[in-house]
Image (cartoon, helix red, strand yellow):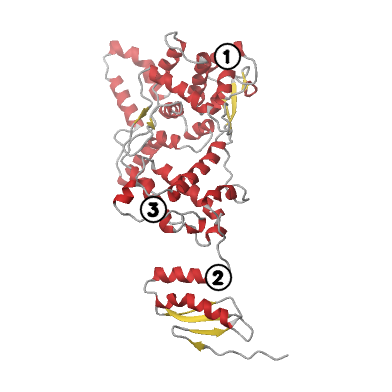
Amino acid sequence: MSREKKVAPMKLAVGSIRRRGVHGYFAYRCQVNGRRTEISLQTRDYHEALKKVAELVPIAQARTAEVIAAHVNEARGFAKQATDLALTDAWSQYEQHPDRAMPHTVSEQLAYRSSFQEFVDFVTRSATKEERQKRISHTTISLVKEITPTVAAEYAAYLRHQPLAVDTHNRKLKRIRKVFSVLKEYHGGDNPFYAKSLFRSEREEQDTIVRRQAFTKDEEQRLLEELRSPKHKLMNKEEIRIVYTIGMYTGQRLKDCVLLQWQNIDLPHRRIYVKQFKTGKEVSIPMAPQLYDALTDALQWKCNQYVCPKTAARYNKTNADGKNVGNNLVDIDVLRVIRWIGLDPSVSVPGRKKKMTVYGFHSLRHSFASFCAEAGVPKAVLLSILGTESEIADKYYTHVGNEAQEKAIAAISGTEIVNSAENRIRKALDFIEHIPSPLRDDMVQLREILIGA
């Protein structure tokens, strides 16, 4: 059997071709953007190699790095070409893939599908009237491999002009990015939704000064009074009053309050045990007298495991897709009560389609943290009840370290804190000492309290 001779590099009009080793693949050598580059042609047949070289000639003739990179990526993909997959079939392929996202809720699962479908509708649409009038080029895309970073950028620009919050914009793109990362064999290159420039910055909404508000003690009492009053009608009104009471005296979220079960209530020892749905953390909370009275009232309708059985059934309602729709129904009931006391639960914000919530059931959680901070309850104790390193706690406990900071500055500057607690007590004692004697006797008890006697 004759041995194949080593083939010397052969110069072409642009670049050269050579075999790697005696029996190796042919490779194409050329100058790309001033640098020597060698690309494997993935074939041992000389004539087939020449055909592939003819397709690679534009690399050597390219003038920009972007065009060169595109040609090189295409050349390196000879051995692995992207498989054709219609965009209309992409979702069914994705939802069968083992690497797909696995959201915990049906709602988020449906959000992945709807976000991807919105993108598909955008790229497969016909040219709009405005595009035709302005003679804007528009190419209808039908395959996954035709989605490029340019197409992704066009879609991101389209979303920027929609009345969406920054978080909503970014969540939509992240879901689509996940789909393309799973379908990578069908687009054959880098994920077109990888670029950071597609996403919006939180700083874009830094002028939006709309935050969740806490209720005052007076507002909380008015909420309960309205729920006891026959003036307004509301589905499962008595149960909603119990739900509100649980939220006020435990600081728990709406779902934890609505779905609270009797097995987690220890009436004799006046304690409630909650395993939070959102975090999975278990908390144990002493029962306030007002909450004890409310739960005692709820015993009259005890019929299953839930403290508020009708409201729980309403909350757990799902649609044909298995998505929970009852949580919105109960939330609407809760917001209606807030309107009864003259508060507007939400406000319109420029640039957003949906209003931003100011007052809601979650406001009770803010109130709980606020009242604890005002009463001097240690932050760690509050967190043991709220059950998480909550930003809510940080919001109301930022002032706790102020006096300690003032003491630190006073220590290094050799001065004393003007309005410290010690100074305020000293001034109060001095004031009492100078009260006329007929009145001073009445101040003895106050003096003893101030000095800790």
Work out whether residue 13 can be spotted.
yes
Q: Amino acid at mark 3?
A: Glu
Q: Residue at x 50, y 18 (%)?
A: 240
Picture coordinates of residue 140, whole percent (x, y): 43, 53
**Residue topped by disc 1:** 298
In the picture shown, does residue 440 fall above or below 275?
above
Which residue is label 3 attached to?
A: 154
What residue appears at the point 49 percent right and 49 percent down from the top-left corner? 176
Assess whether mark 2 and mark 1 are in contact (beta carbons under 8 angstroms): no
Secondary structure state at the residue bearing disc 3: helix
Front-most of residues 450 and 187: 187
Residue sitting farthest toward the right: 1
In the image, taking residue 238 as reference, residue 447 lies left or right, namely left
Residue at (28, 13) in percent of width and height: 437
Residue drawn at (58%, 66%) of the image: 80
Q: Which residue is mark 2?
A: 78
Could you tell which of marks 2 and 3 lies nearer the N-terminus?
Answer: 2
Q: For the residues marked 1 and 2, what is the alpha-carbon distance in whole angstroms?
A: 72 Å
| Left or right: 217 as drawn, with respect to 117 | left
Say above or below: 347 vs 22.
above
Q: Where does residue 277 sit, x and y in percent of width and height?
A: 57, 33
Query: In the depicted view, which residue is nearer to us: 251 or 226?
Result: 226
Residue type, numbered disc 1:
Ala
Q: Nearer the viewer, residue 308 or 83?
A: 83
Give neighbour class at mark 2: few <14, some 14-19, many 20+ (Cα, 10 Å): some
Q: Quadrant of the N terminus?
A: bottom right
